[in-house]
Image (spheres, rainbow, N blue to C red):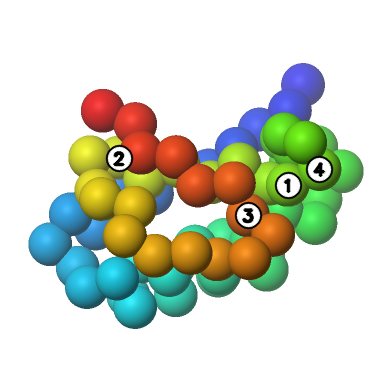
Amino acid sequence: MKAAIILDGLYTEPAAAKAMWVQKVNTEFAGHGQYLLIHGEPLIMLFSAPVDFDVPGVLLRNVY
């Protein structure tokens, strides 16, 4: 089974704060063998928050 992380509660945060949280998830979890990769990139989702930033090497998606 593969797993991925969804971040919540970041809707009102600035882009830099969201990018920091995504990078933290990428560093702490995405290297594990059971983390879900899509096209070789770890999937990290944000719940109901604009994806107004970029983190290289990470597939970002907004889910609502």
Residue found at the far right of this picture? 33
> x, y (%) of residue 9?
22, 53
- Image quadrant in which you'd find residue 63: top left
Q: Amino acid at mark 1?
A: Glu
**Dot 1 and dot 4 residues touching (CB under 8 Å):** yes
The CA distance from mark 2 to mark 4 is 22 Å
Q: Which residue is mark 1?
A: 41
- Tag of residue 40: 4
SS state under label 3: loop
Q: Amino acid at mark 3?
A: Val
Residue found 24% across the figure and 48% down from its top: 49
- Tag of residue 58: 3
Residue found 22% across the figure and 73% down from its top: 14
Observer-side mark, 2 or 4, equals 4
The CA distance from mark 3 to mark 1 is 5 Å
- Mark 3 crowdedness (10 Å alpha carbons): few <14, some 14-19, many ≥20: some
- The answer, for residue 29, to whether it is visible in the render is no
- Quadrant for the N terminus, please: top right
Q: Which residue is mark 2?
A: 47
**Dot 3 and dot 1 residues touching (CB under 8 Å):** yes
Judge whether 26 appears above or below 63 on screen.
below
Residue found 81% across the figure and 50% down from its top: 32
- The answer, for residue 57, to whether it is visible in the render is yes
- Quadrant for the C terminus, please: top left
Q: Earlier in the sequence, mark 3 or mark 2?
A: 2
Q: Amino acid at mark 4?
A: Gly
Q: Earlier in the sequence, mark 1 or mark 2?
A: 1
SS state under label 1: strand
The CA distance from mark 3 to mark 4 is 9 Å
**Dot 1 and dot 2 residues touching (CB under 8 Å):** no
- Image quadrant in which you'd find residue 29: bottom right
